[in-house]
Amino acid sequence: MSLLLRQDTATVEEIEQHLRECDGAFVPLLSLRVDLGQFAAKIHAKAVRFEAWDDTHLVGLVSAYFNEPEQRLGFVNHVGTVPSHAGRGVARSLLGRCLAHARQAGFAFVGLEVAAGNARAIALYRRLGFVTTEQDGDSMQMRLDLA
């Protein structure tokens, strides 16, 4: 599989289409928690985006906020791979690029939130070094120390 990895090139419409394609992989469904159009617009406007493209199709997306450098804490707000490319290391590769960006920008920590029932995502985050910092009901907070 030969994918093109890019940063910050997807349009709002491409991000929204990606979110719709990935919706079924989220526990619970992403569309039950956020308006996908509004979320796509927010990602486009405020997040750094790490993208995997198969020709003209956005197949993987990791987005993160790095808007508070004085706190030295970044926050991953979306990790998604379309079903046709799941299990091929796309998310891991994009997360690696995201973490490299955070280190280069001088961030000390990267956090994220994941559904406690999403074993596959939790296993990926743990393999990358994230540890659980808090669990509140169905939601789990994880953090990676970049030092």
Image: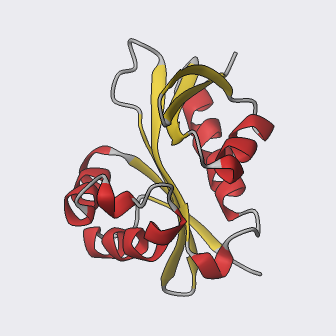
- 55, 27: nearer the viewer: 27
Query: Where on the picture, by quarter, is residue 91?
Result: bottom right
Q: Position of residue 61 (x, y in %)?
A: 51, 61
- 99, 116: nearer the viewer: 116
| Farthest-out residue, bottom | 55
Give the residue at x 64% y 82%.
84
Number of numbered discs visible in the structure rendering: 0
Give the residue at x 24% y 51%.
42
Query: Colour scheme used in the picture?
Result: secondary structure
Q: Position of residue 143 (x, y in %)?
A: 59, 24
Q: In this picture, is 93 found above or below 4?
A: above
Classify the position of the N terminus by image quarter. Answer: bottom right
| Farthest-out residue, front | 137
Whether residue 51 is visible, yes or no, is no
Give the residue at x 73% y 46%.
124
Give the residue at x 66% y 76%.
85
Q: Position of residue 69 (x, y in %)?
A: 40, 20
- 90, 105: nearer the viewer: 90
Q: In this picture, is 138 found above or below 105?
A: below
44 to the left or right of 80: left
Query: Where on the picture, by quarter, is residue 70?
Result: top left
12 to the left or right of 129: left
